[in-house]
Amino acid sequence: MNQKISSSSQEQPSVQGDNSSLKDNMKSKSIWLRLFFMIVMAFLYSLSRVVVGAIAVVQFFWVLFTQKKNLNLMTLGQALATYAYQTSLYLTFNTEERPFPFDAEWPN
């Protein structure tokens, strides 16, 4: 029984250290600024998915009526796919570079 008490008393300083780190993180402006950018980027990501859907529909009807693919729509679709990939990397903390319109240029 004494061993359990002493082991739990040894764990408390590490828990207090974790609480100190948590408090520091909660006060960190960079964490909250990242949250702001993540919210903005999540909105732009959602918007880009809607635009990709519209491009797919327009491209379908373009091919249906002309029997040819629209190169401009293909280029825009590729750029939006790259943008969505870059945004996903940022949102999942795989990169610190914020996608367009913040740190990176619009994908070609």
Image: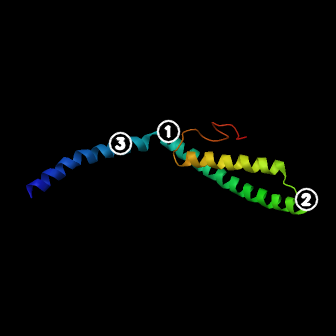
The extreme left residue here reads 2
Q: In the shown orientation, is residue 18 left or right of residue 81?
A: left
x and y percentages locating residue 36 in the rendered image: 56, 46
- Say which element carries label 1: helix
Q: Are marks 3 and 1 in contact (CB under 8 Å)?
A: no
The residue positioned 39% from the left and 40% from the top of the image is 24
Q: Earlier in the sequence, mark 3 or mark 1?
A: 3
Q: Position of residue 61 (x, y in %)?
A: 85, 62
- Mark toward the viewer: 3 or 2: 2
User: What residue did someone put label 1 on?
Assistant: 30
Within 10 angstroms of label 2, few (less than 14), some, or many (20 or more) residues? few
Where is mark 3, residue-wise?
Answer: 21
Q: What is the secondary structure assignment of the residue under circle 2?
A: helix
Q: In the rendered structure, which amino acid carries the disc numbered 1? A: Ser
- Image quadrant in which the C terminus is located: top right
State the residue in front, 101 or 27.
Answer: 101
Compute the Cα span from label 3 to label 1. 14 Å
Q: Characterize the local packing of mark 1: few (<14), some (14-19) or many (20 or more) Cα atoms within 10 angstroms.
A: few
N-terminal of the two: label 2 or label 1? 1
Judging by the rendered image, the residue that carries numbered circle 2 is 66
Label 3 or label 2, whichever comes before in sequence order: 3
| In this picture, residue 44 sits left or right of residue 33 | right
